[in-house]
Amino acid sequence: MNAHQSVGIVMIEDDEGHARLIEKNIRRAGILNDIKHFTDGTQALHHLFDAADGPAKAGPALVLLDLNLPDMSGTDILAQIKAEGSPLKRTPVVVLTTTDDKIEIQRCYDLGCNVYITKPVNYESFAQAIRQLGLFLSVIQVPEVEEH
Amino acid sequence: MLTRVSNPFVVSEGRFGRVLVSFMVLGFLALIAAGVAAGLATQRNEEHTGWVNHTYEVELAIGTARRLIEQSEASRRGYLLTDNREYRDAYYRWATALPVALARLRRLTHDNPRQVAALAVLQDEIGALLAQRTRTIALIDAGRIDTAVALFRTEASVKRLATIRNGFGTMAREERRLLAGRDEAQRASVRAFYLILGVAAVILALVALVSLLTVLRYTRDLSRSRDSLRDFNERLEETVTERTADLSRANEEIQRFAYIVSHDLRSPLVNVMGFTAELSAATAPLAELLDKAEAECPQIVGEDARLAVREDLPEAIGFIRTSTQKMDRLINAILKLSREGRRVITPEPIDPGAVVDTIGGSIRHLLDDRGVALSVERPIPPVVTDRVAIEQILSNLIENATKYLQPGRPGEIVVSGEERRGRVILSVADNGRGIDPRDHQRIFDLFRRSGQQDQPGEGIGLAHVRALAYRLGGTIDVDSELGRGSTFRLNLPKIYEVQDIKP
């Protein structure tokens, strides 16, 4: 692991508004990591696995994943990331979606998702969830900082 | 569409019966006519035989009388020729037998005036003949044979005898003529008998033929209608299977649709809500700025700006918030219903009474707070159905009953059940404020409520209950009177059958 690289955040979210809100709240939580935003699964997968500056080739990352994408289901991306032999197997994935269907949530955890957050309409709890996510991000960031 | 089965066979069954009965009646009439004709013919035949016998008797009597006259004549002549006493005895023998024979002939012919007249003439002749003979015999007895012979020569005995023979011949011919007439009548009656018999036979044959044809046609119709009924039945089954498949496909489509819609509706709502919060957050520094401006430089603060920041913005944001929150609840309700529709039903034996007890335990505080008494009227027949679904139905109904009380009357909820032809009807009866009859159907619709809106809720509970009831193969309805109370009746199959029809 490259000690000089901070954790990059890959946000896969087709809704620009949601992306903006997530970013704002992450920033408010004091997380200043680089956020790369993709609005569709194809580009995101390309970045994750093939891009020179992508997580597979260059350094650790955290994936924020929406399950409803125009070109594929978020669970497909999750499955690919967490698949046996995947270079990103240990990359934490936070699923952020509007679905609070138990079966869907279970399926995501079965596939290896680390955190599952339902996007609530109640904005306060949404902001809180994102901020908690920020805390979580800073927690997983700590070893990186310590390694400096 | 179910095509109405045309029912010609039902109509023709009545007609068929009538036709058959009328043919049978006709056949029986023909038989009776034949029987009567046979009886009459036999009677006529007997009569005729009687008459034939009579004729022969008459002929015999005529013959006897003639023979007696001839024989006595022969005896008289013998006596006259030979003076032999034996001839005399023979004569007397014949002569005494003659009146008896004549009397018999008279008796036999007394009903025929012509014969009677003929016989009367004959008798005169016979009387004269006898008188003459008696004289001859007497003369011979007295030994005056010559006188007797002389008398014999003069007498017209031969002519008289010829007349008598003629008379008897006439009588015999008359009798023959009568017999011929009777024979003719007999033949006519036999002909009539055969005619009637023939007609009856023809009618019977016709009746048999027509009956046979009718029965055959009826049987053919019957088998044809049976075939068409079977075809129809098969088609119906196919149709039902098809329709059920269509329905479950449509149902799934709707559920998927509801799921997707509610899911996708939430996405923009997150934005609306999120950015409303951003707006709300942005008003804080604006308000600060306004305060600062008012304090430091009041002349730059216009009334519009003040209103906008202090009232219009917070008000607008507030409305947006409550509306989006409400919308979120509604979407969640649709989502819940659509999920309910997709949930797998797992039937198991359930005692509804025990379920009510459990519900009563879990909402004990609610019942106590509202002063409501919940009781179960046992026995309640057990059902085989989905536990979660029936728990949700009953708890929704019971909670509703605790919510809508009639003011001033302590609430009473009675749950009862009965079994009726393979179905179990569970009733949840309360003495609450009741439901307007206009709303009895409406309350089961999503987001629809009835009466005074003084209780929190979105109008989801009963819609949910109905969806669950349908899911369990049951129905739900309500019987209610304003101010008196309501009774919700859940009609469930006694044993839930898994619908294995796949679209």
Image (cartoon, coloured by chain):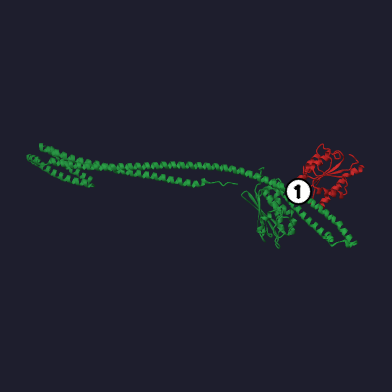
Q: Is residue B82 visible?
A: no
Percent of width and height locating residue A14: 79, 46
Colour that chain A carries in the picture: red
Observer-nearest residue: B48 or B413?
Answer: B48
Quarter of the C terminus of chain A within the rendering: top right
Q: Residues within 10 Å of mark 1 (few under 14, many from 20)?
A: some
Q: Is residue B117 visible?
A: yes
Element type at mark 1: helix
Residue shown at the point (50%, 41%) measured from the top left: B220
- In the rendered structure, the answer to whether residue B435 lies left or right of residue B289 reads left
Residue shown at the point (38%, 45%) measured from the top left: B32
Which chain letter matches label 1?
Answer: B
User: Could you tell me the amino acid type at mark 1?
Assistant: Asp
- In the rendered structure, the answer to whether residue A20 lies left or right of residue B233 reads right
Q: Residue under label 1, please give it.
A: B264
- In the rendered structure, the answer to whether residue A14 lies left or right of residue B215 reads right
Q: Quadrant of residue B100?
A: top left
Percent of width and height locating residue B18: 46, 47
In the displayed structure, A43 sits above or below B390; it is above
Residue shown at the point (87%, 49%) measured from the top left: A27
In the displayed structure, B409 sits above or below B80; it is below
- In the rendered structure, the answer to whether residue B152 lies left or right of residue B200 reads left
Q: Quadrant of residue B450?
A: bottom right
Observer-nearest residue: B130 or B142?
Answer: B130
Q: Quadrant of residue B189?
A: top left
Percent of width and height locating residue A103: 75, 45
In the figure, the green chain has which letter?
B
Residue shown at the point (63%, 49%) measured from the top left: B423
Percent of width and height locating residue A2: 90, 39
Quarter of the N terminus of chain A within the rendering: top right
